[in-house]
Amino acid sequence: MSHWNTLLQSALVGTARQPVPAAEGMAGEFGGLLQAIQAGEAQGQLLRVAGAVAIGRRAGFVAPGLSPSDAPIATADERPVLNDPALQAAIADALASGPLRLQHEGLAAVTAAGLRLPHNLLPTALDAGRRAIDLRPSVIPALGERGLWLAARNDDWRYAVGASEQADAQTRWDEGSLEQRRAVLVEQRRSDPAAARDRLAAELPQLPAKERAALLGALAENIGPDDEALIDAQLKDRARDVRQAAVELLQRLPASAHVLRIEAFLAPLLSQVGGAWQLNAPEAADPRWKDDAIDPVRPIHDSLGERAWWLYQLVRQTPLSCWTTHTGMTPAALLGWAEKSDWKDALFRGWNEAILATADVEWGDAMLDHHHTQYSQRAWVGQLLALLPRERRERHWVIELGLADSGVQNVIAFADQACAPGETPSAELSLQLAGALRTRVERGDLVNDYVLRQVLGNAAALLHADALHLLADLPRAAEESPGLASALSDTARIVRARQLFATLRLSSTSSSSSSSSSSSSSSQGRP
């Protein structure tokens, strides 16, 4: 256990039960400092030492028992460092207090430019990744070799520990982080699916549940019938996340034994009476369900009744193509039919999960069309929109814009959920949204509309770069409440940062173009 964790334990149980850990034997000047301040009553010792160690950890505090001379040396960085003071300040500000989307954009711009973060920003970036798991894929590539070395010195930063950026695939698999290992599998699945599957099968029994689920998901790349046996075996895994990952993969194999078993469970419940399809729910749990990751026990706080709970699990594991093939109905027609069913909640919930598991665009589009007037009550809207290509997404957003006065706010909220980091709505729609927001600011809506203040900052971080000028230099009043002043200042700061990040991307693009032209000219000049 690290010195810091021992300090935390002393603070939790009390110094009377667990004394402040001694600093004797800790190497270097920092160890000497800790020994010097360990005097007086225990409570005061704990507070002084904790304060010193907290500051030391931010600088990559070397763990007790490991002298600096024994610490491995960081691999030399091949990438140059980001030296521009304005960009450094913008990234530091974004990592400290900016929205997550802005943090992604700044880090991605550094990486795309072939640069790495300066040493003084490494602790800030590593802390940002500790707080936000979703940010880690952008943090790690921007760290450089010194950042990876620093991460290994601090327990809170170990998520970033992995193989060197220059390492080959086998080294990244053997020594890399979870993200690096998953990337190795995905890459190998594209060229040699069987070898990647064998690699995973050999490793699965030794992995913790989180890693089993994450790496199993890599089999979605180039999935085929030969993968069925390995995936089917994971249905009996003790971890729910692993079983769920297996179910989602098997839905992509409609001829698999698992899917055929699920269809056999569902078939007696779906019948045609007088030309109309009718659906019932199971009357009782089937003991065979346990082999297919179907839980017969309904969670206490689930909104579905017991029979609906059973039906929902069958529906979410049934490939969507089975419904259209069996009934002859289109997705839109099936959704209309389900709306009149006594079991509609189980059907819609199960279908939503099946759509997300298989990334079915046609079903996702139909589901969004079906529920346009109920968007604000449905948490899954952003996830479904994320499946669609931009043109289809924006068709739904244009409809939403015309539904109510809050249309602009709803569209920005949905777009924020649907657009992956680095993705934006189109320039045309962004201009429309930014223009509508500016109009509302100019007429004074921000004074009393507290939701709009939040939306304004989200829009500044989200919309296409071509629309940012409409959110720059928004009108200010002589007298502003602290909340209003903060919202306008935050928006202006986000816009300035994004405009700076854009210059970094443009400079890297220009450099790449110049290099290509130079290389081409050199080639053409050769005899």
Image (tube, helix red, strand yellow):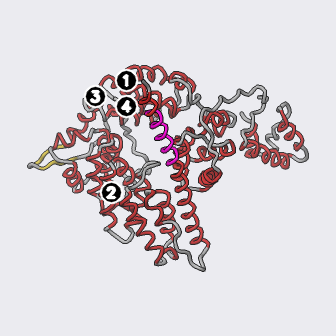
Q: Is residue 237 visible from the viewing direction of this image?
A: no
* First of labels 4, 2 by sequence position: 4
Q: CA distance from mark 4 to mark 1?
A: 8 Å
Asked which quadrant contains residue 435, the reply is: bottom left
Residue shown at 21% from the left, 55% from the top: 336
Give coordinates of residue 310: x percent, y percent: 32, 43
Disc 1 marks a residue whose amino acid type is Pro
Q: Which residue position is annotated with label 1?
A: 193
Disc 2 marks a residue whose amino acid type is Glu
Residue shown at 34% from the left, 70% from the top: 404
Residue shown at 28% from the left, 27% from the top: 257
Label pair 4/1, CB-CB below 8 angstroms: yes
Of badges 4 and 2, nearer the viewer stands: 2
**Dot 3 surroundings within 10 Å: few (below 14), some, or many (20 or more)?**
some
Q: Which mark is residue 394?
A: 2
Query: Does 73 sit left or right of 52 as displayed?
Result: left
Query: Does 434 sit left or right of 177 as displayed?
Result: left
Of badges 1 and 3, nearer the viewer stands: 1
Disc 3 marks a residue whose amino acid type is Ser
Q: Which residue position is annotated with label 4?
A: 221
